[in-house]
Amino acid sequence: MAERKHGDVYTVLYAAGVCVACSLALAAAAAGLRPRQERMAELDRRFNVLKAFGAPVTDAAGRRIGSDRIEQLYSTHVRERVVNAQTGQIIADRTPGGLSPAEQAAGRLLPLYEWIENNRVERYAFPVSGKGLWSTIYGYLALDGALENVVGLTFYKHGETPGLGGEIESEWFQSQFRGRRLIVPEGPLPIVIAKGAASEAERTDPNRVVVDGISGATLTGRGVMEFLNADIRRYAAFIRSRRGG
Amino acid sequence: MSGKLRKTFTDPLSENNPITIQILGICSALAVTVQLRTAIVMALALTTVTAGSNLIISLLRRGIPPRIRLIVEMVVVSTLVILADQFLRAYLFDVSRQLSVFVGLIITNCIVLGRLEAYALQNPPLPSLLDGLGNGLGYGAVLVLVAFIRELLGSGRLFGAAVLPEHLPRNGLALLAPGAFIVLGLLIWTQRTLTKHFDSE
């Protein structure tokens, strides 16, 4: 090097100074913005519960409904419950938000959402989540009041590749589940996400629920398939108790 | 504003546009231009980052030890990008979800580092700020144009509101990545013809 204007000590101190300044800025922003970010994330979660339930979440022009409408629909129609995984009974005075991380991990208490219309429970939804290819995927699966057919499936948080695994968020993928008969008297049918398009024989197979996979995202599909089936099984006791079987 | 300063700002808008002339930042230009809303937010985020990092690096330019120059630049750029991402998550949650990784990828956008290296390290703060703003907006202008064409032809909407009559067929290709390539290619052709910019042999 022709000229060494700055010595090593200067260089190290300079680097440290830049790092401290940047960390301070980031820490301040993260702390200051957190309450608002959490509120937005909660609103998005509620939006997806509503969407899984098949509630009208878009207006006439096809745009997302606003936050007021989300809150209004959610508070009038959605009741948050907690279910005992072994007995399938609803535990009074508990809500999913009140479950500690330890309780969630143990899996003995399960969150459940009920769609109330005219004081009757018309539909049920529960969270589904698990590993995709790169990330943990979070979503909701809603079933009709008879706990037989799928009302809707949504995914709202994931870190899959946009355009490939990220397509799990798309309407065409999620709508394939809508109206499918998932629970038979013997129990839940296995969900199968095909590699690419499912054949006609697979699609009409009465013993499985087969949907088209996303090309280029076979591994994301496999992850989704595994956690959907596992999460549905966790609610088996609840489903049995409700279906009187 | 003197002529030279104005030129610093306006040059990247057209004659030296980062996308259509320098062919930088193509990845995000293809990825976030399905809708106008995401394109505009992305353009603003990138403009904030280029302008901010140009200004900061220009202020620091005499003190930065040459041996860690690039590292310092990257730290400043990363910080600004994370700040932009945090703000989007707090105030434009749904757009930030649609933009997903692409806000984070501004860090690796060649336009940002390119302007730091080519301009901010040698020039005083005010021209550097203008240069950053100009390049950000030049990038943004192309993004908005591409998104306008893609959203209109692909889904018949602008800003999510239906504008084309229902019976007109939509061009699904415009919504896909190949459609973006075609639109961008045509734009580059048009713009280079208009500004008489031709690559020398």
Image: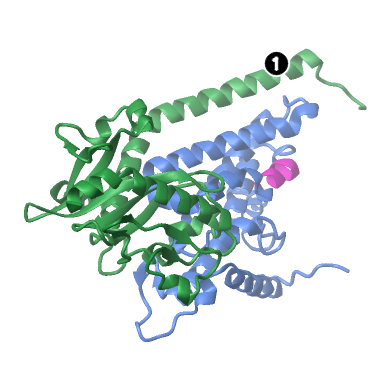
Question: Outermost residue toward the bottom?
Answer: B167
Left or right: A224 as drawn, with respect to A18: left
Does the rendering let one see residue A67?
Answer: no
Does the rendering let one see residue A212?
Answer: yes
- The stretch drawn in magenta includes residue A52: no
Question: Outermost residue toward the top?
Answer: A9
What is the three-letter code of the residue carrying label 1?
Answer: Leu
- The stretch drawn in magenta includes residue B116: yes
Q: Which of B97 and A77 lies nearest the eye of the viewer?
A: A77
| Label 1 sits on residue | A13
Quadrant in which residue A40 is drawn? top left
Q: Position of residue B119 (x, y in %)?
A: 72, 43
Give the SS element for disc 1: helix
Q: Position of residue A45 (x, y in %)?
A: 32, 46
Instruction: Count neighbours of disc 1 (C-alpha within 10 A) and say few if under 14, some if 14 to 19, many if 20 or more.
Output: few
Chain A representation colour: green
Main secondary structure found in the magenta portion: helix
Question: Which residue occupies 73% across, 37% down?
Answer: B121
Q: Which chain is blue?
A: B
Q: Taking A49 as reference, is B52 above or below it?
A: above
Tell me which chain the residue with mark 1 is part of: A
Quadrant in which residue B7 is drawn? bottom right
Q: Which of A111 and B141 lies nearest the eye of the viewer?
A: A111
Question: Which residue occupies 60% across, 46% down?
Answer: B106
Quadrant in which residue B61 is drawn? top right
Q: Taking A197 as reference, is B167 above or below it?
A: below
Q: Which of B24 and A240 lies nearest the eye of the viewer?
A: A240
Question: Which residue occupies 34% across, 32% down?
Answer: A104
Question: Which residue occupies 79% across, 28% down?
Answer: B66
Boundaries of the magenta span: B112-119
Left or right: B107 as drawn, with respect to A165: right
